[in-house]
Amino acid sequence: MDRRKFLTSTLAAGATASVASTAAAQANKTIRIVGVSCSPREGKTTATAIQVALDAARTVDPRIRVELIDLGGLQIAGSLGGATSAGASQPEDDFDLEVLPVLKTPCLPDGMIIGSPSYFRSMSALCKPFLERLQIFREPKLLLADMVLGALATGAYRNGGQELVIQEIHTAMLVHEVMVAGGKPRAHQGATLWNNWKDDIIKDEFGIETAEQLGIRVAEAALRLKT
Ligand SMILES: Cc1cc2nc3c(=O)[nH]c(=O)nc-3n(C[C@H](O)[C@H](O)[C@H](O)COP(=O)(O)O)c2cc1C
């Protein structure tokens, strides 16, 4: 089942056929880009940076719809190793209740921008389980294949491991056969932001520009792939 068919069957389960077909037609016309902030601190620098990237993405084309999922405050357990997409042994948590419904509705994203703070020069302990739980999209087929993926990282230091964090996210997401996108010049790896002004990340002009470049690049690539 490909991603579009998955959408159609998902919608059909809970709605009338006519509502489903209207939603599917609408979803086909739009390019959906979802940002995911993987900081445990809701609404802080990583979420702000993702929002900046999404706002820039939206300027690329009127068909682009953006949405932020802030994982801050959510309880998401790492995979317990369930072999199936149902994750038979995986207890239900906020990934199932809060994240999955948004990711899937009204259709799987055409583009995704994942951001994490650098924690000891690595991704946050919230980012890892989120990435592991995306396993559900690998079965029965690779439902995220060809989705455009961009990544960003925040850190308290200018060179606090942001590029390493981005690389970790890229590496994990390649198991879905996503198309990795960097940014335009000065943001080729993705967006790297410096939290040097007491959580006022907007003051990092260079970093904010990389977030904008990343959002634009992801949007352009998603647009090109879909149309
Ligand atoms: C446990 C921990 C480890 C951290 N390690 C790093 C680090 O290795 N490099 C760095 O630049 N910043 C590090 N930081 C700072 C955060 O990356 C930085 O404050 C970031 O902006 C936080 O993102 P948030 O505002 O979205 O929560 C660390 C913070 C914590 C709490």
Image (cartoon, rainbow, N blue to C red):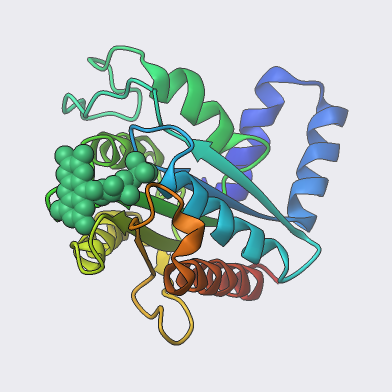
**Quarter-wise, where is residue 110 in the image?**
bottom right
Q: Is residue 81 above or below residue 174?
A: above
Q: Residue furthest left?
A: 120
Q: Is residue 208 above or below residue 32?
A: below
Q: Position of residue 114 (x, y in %)?
A: 41, 52
Q: Is residue 225 above or below residue 195?
A: below
Q: Position of residue 75 (x, y in %)?
A: 33, 20
Q: Is residue 134 above or below residue 74?
A: below
Residue 148 is at least partly visible in this image: no
Q: Position of residue 65 (x, y in %)?
A: 71, 52
Q: Residue at x 28, y 62 (%)?
A: 166
Q: Residue at x 56, y 42 (%)?
A: 68
Q: Residue at x 81, y 47 (%)?
A: 25
Q: Residue at x 41, y 74 (%)?
A: 182
Depth order, front residue of 17/119: 119
135 with respect to 21 (left or right): left
**The C terminus sits in image quarter:** bottom right
Depth order, front residue of 159/185: 159
Q: Residue furthest bottom?
A: 185
Q: Position of residue 77 (x, y in %)?
A: 25, 23
